[in-house]
Amino acid sequence: MRDRLPFALRFYRLASMAAASTIAPRLLARRVRRGKENPARLAERYGQASLPRPVGPMIWIHGASVGETLSVIPLVEHLRARNFAVLLTSGTVTSAALAERRLPAGAQHQFIPFDAPRFVRRFLDHWRPGLALFVESDLWPNLILACRDRAIPMILVNGRVSEHSFSRWRLLPDTISALLQRFDLCLAQSSADARRYATLGAPHVSSTGNLKLDVPPPPADLSALQALKSQIGERVMIAAASTHADEEKDIIAVRRRLRTKSPTLLTIIAPRHPERGQGIAEAAKFAGLSVALRSRGELPKAGVDVFISDTLGELGLIYRLAPIVFMGGSLASHGGQNPIEAIRLGAAVVHGPHVWNFAEIYAALDAARGAKLIADEEGLLACLGSWLADPAAREAVAAAAAAAVEKLGGALERTLTALEPYLMQLQLERRAS
């Protein structure tokens, strides 16, 4: 099959071989300086394992970042309950921190190696997976080609391909087809995703649903939750989760404009990138608002207008506190964020138009009147003002959202059913050994 590789993949392999010695060290050094790599685990990026391989057949699961990692935690738990060794790889420090907190006992995490042939070879030589599950759309050519060369079954789970990615891949049809044809199964999030994968060349495609709909609510430290509740008291709250810069400007402007009608309102901002907390605080102060920063150990005491949750892994706290949540990445053109966790914890959700990362979910929510679509700062002001003045209307939206999410569930069970023949084969190998 190597001889039949299209030119783009042959060129990529040659280029990545050269980049292993030249570009990779410089790229990773720059990422270390920017806080995007863990210096203590940098060897993993070169395919050098920092953990021993467990005995027996291993299932390797790869997801790019936090969202993918979170979506497969319940799947990992089911696999561990059947005593399969599980390796989870990802590419960001935030996903690694999440894995450390949320992976079940016996599951291991490593950073995905740089996609150069010798790093991939080193990685696979050590871990020797019996089954590889790629999550959503993080498809690295050398990893895929090397797995097929070693006859490692590969399955795409929770597969997603946006309209933008679909249009881009259609410019290189032979390339994407050559990669997708090496997968044994493609389990897509939706029927639309399934159609796109089939059009791009995936041979065995089915729609199993979105695993993110089956993820339980994020945990929260009970003592921290109680401490925040005691400081907030009876104040009304709204939260903005996983926000970007332009959205934070709108949130701050809306909080300032609501000052007269809701003088005790507390606005919580949890930025997508917590390191931007100080800059958000300065913007809020410039707007005449009182600010507290979570990263400094400050609390939202009486008189604080904006509480900036610039820490990792605390959305579980935020969603348990705020009855209204604006989902970030949706006014700014970033594709939106997953609203399921906030909904499962009782929040009414408001979002902008740019939600292509979760198009099916938001379409179902909007159709059921389980979320509010707004287009700009004025729409956000009108929505928040209305819900603050009419708690019953807000609660009706939250209840409709919970019902819609319940109907959309079941992806985990369908995914496990599709994986069952491969899991049985691994069990037979384990018994034989």
Image (cartoon, helix red, strand yellow):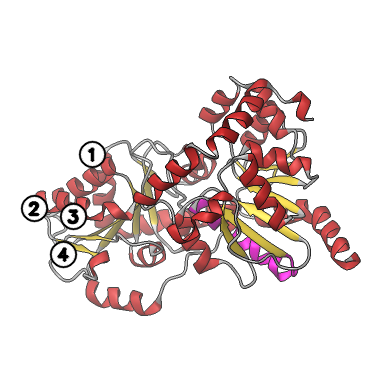
Identity, as a three-letter code, of the amino acid under mark 1 = Glu
Residue plotted at (13% across, 54% down): 259
User: Label 4 vs label 3: CA separation?
Assistant: 12 Å
> Residue at coordinates 43% horizontally, 53% vertically from top-left?
37
How far is the residue under mark 3 from the one under mark 1? 22 Å
Q: Residue at x 75, y 33 (%)?
A: 181
Observer-nearest residue: 301 or 309?
309
What's the mark number on residue 288? Answer: 2
The answer to whether 82 is drawn above or below residue 20 in the figure is below
Q: Secondary structure at mark 3?
A: helix
User: Mark 4 belongs to which amino acid?
Assistant: Val
Q: Which residue is mark 4?
A: 304
Q: Secondary structure at mark 1?
A: helix
Quarter of the figure that contains the C terminus: bottom right
- Marks 4/2 in contact by CB < 8 Å: the verdict is no
Q: Which residue is mark 1?
A: 378
Image x and y of residue 39, in percent: 43, 57
**Which sits in the foreground, 425 or 355?**
425
State which tag comes first along the sequence, 4 or 1.
Answer: 4
Q: CA distance from mark 2 to mark 1?
A: 20 Å
> How packed is label 1: few (under 14 Cα within 10 Å), some, or many (20 or more)?
few
Q: Quadrant of residue 11?
A: top right
| Residue occupied by mark 3 | 281
Q: In this view of the protein, which residue sits in the foreground, 50 or 307?
A: 50
Does dot 4 land on a helix, a strand or a loop? loop
Magenta highlight range: 66-84
